[in-house]
Amino acid sequence: MELTGTLKQYILATAESLHGSDRRLFMALTVRLRGPGGQRRAERELGWSRMTIREGLHGLDSGLIRVDALGARGRTRREEHLPELLDDLKAIVDAQCQTDPTFKTQRLYPRLTVATVRQQLIVRKGYTDEQLPTEETIRCKMQRLGFHRTKVRQCKPKKKVKQTDAIFERLNELHAESDTAEDVLRLSLDSKASVKIGLFSRGGKSWVRVAAADHDFRPEATLTPFGILLPRSRDLYLYFATSKVTSDFMVDILDQWWTGVRGRFPQVRTLLINQDNGPEDHSRRTQFMKRIVGFGQTHGLTIRLAYYPPYHSKYNPIERCWGILENHWNGALLETIPTALRFAQTMTWHGKHPLVQLITKSYQKGVRLTPEEMNQLETQIHRLPGLEKWFVDISPRN
């Protein structure tokens, strides 16, 4: 029996309409009609599995038909009935997660309980109590998404100011707005602890034997990583400073970065900048505020500074990149600056390599404005009432 185009379509459509043992028997009868070599020809021309065909032939010859218990295969996952559930779950939990404080794993630790997450799905996402699965099921789904529980001593910050909850609420509002606005670009900025360059062990593991120096008193050099992360597009930019990371350094890097990428974002008029209220970039640092105001005026941008509360800096998205970098180069010896830069270039963040650059310019610490100069500068700054230190808007002059 030769297969014409019409006959082939008829056979495939008939097999597709059958299920279980009926489909296997139909496949076996079709192969028998084709004669010797039918299994191989059916595999080649119809795309059928020879294992499935043999099972159908065994049923024809023995008379023993295996009945498929399709109804006993368990319930379908809840996300098949609620296709937006996992995205909504991640949106709620991700904003309330901190990275591993030791930077030794890539795990994320949410500050919310599972019961709170379930309640937020009802209040913020419009689900009903009957639609949502149990707390235990939600916990399992959170683990599959990469969120994990850990000991309280690792999650709980050392201190908590009274404005902490209000700060997180405002951060969530700003992030939700920026993720849907085409003219707003959200950045996450932070610097990492300095890295010693030399034949020093970094506590990592390697597949080959590596011998490091037994003392690290005199490094060849030190590098301080500074990162800019775009949470929406997941683009990462790493700058390695041989000098101190000061207010001037941060704004110079921000200016250099924006000059290089603004062609990609012609519609952006506002930069929402997440930071962790460090000593060189908090909103009361006079030199930083002077430089960031000048940056916004130079480029005609509205700058929105949104800081994470004290002792909660690990919720800043850029912090998650440092753990990946540490795992990537900890098993090697960073004996020279080019070696460290090459390791940074080969790390990946969500499948993308970062743009890496070495900054050798020296910066002076301790630069600050006089009280009179800062008072004049405050006239160009709008602070959020009640949270003045953490949320600052800077509009360009007309």
Image: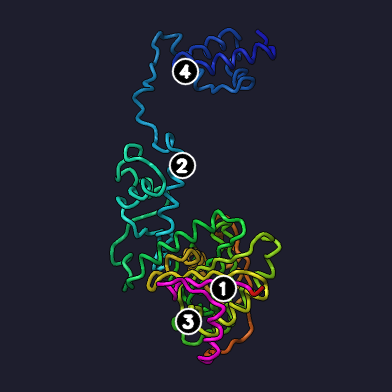
Q: Residue at x 49, y 69 (%)?
A: 306
The outermost residue toward the right is 263
Instruction: Report the residue marked by disc 4.
Output: 19
Nearest to viewer (mark 3 / mark 2): 3
Name which residue type carries label 2: Glu
In the rendered image, is residue 336 in sight? no
- Residue 111 image offset from top left, x and y in percent: 34, 60
Instruction: Report the residue marked by disc 2.
Output: 84
Instruction: Report the residue marked by disc 3.
Output: 284
Is disc 2 surrounded by few (<14), some (14 to 19) or many (20+) residues within 10 Å?
Answer: few
- Which label's residue is closer to the chain start, 3 or 4? 4
Name which residue type carries label 1: Ile
Name which residue type carries label 4: His
Number of the label disc, if any, that sits on residue 394: 1
**Helix, strand or loop for disc 4:** loop
- Which label's residue is closer to the chain start, 1 or 4? 4
Question: Is 384 in the magenta?
Answer: yes
Considering only vertical position in the picture, is 26 above or below 388? above
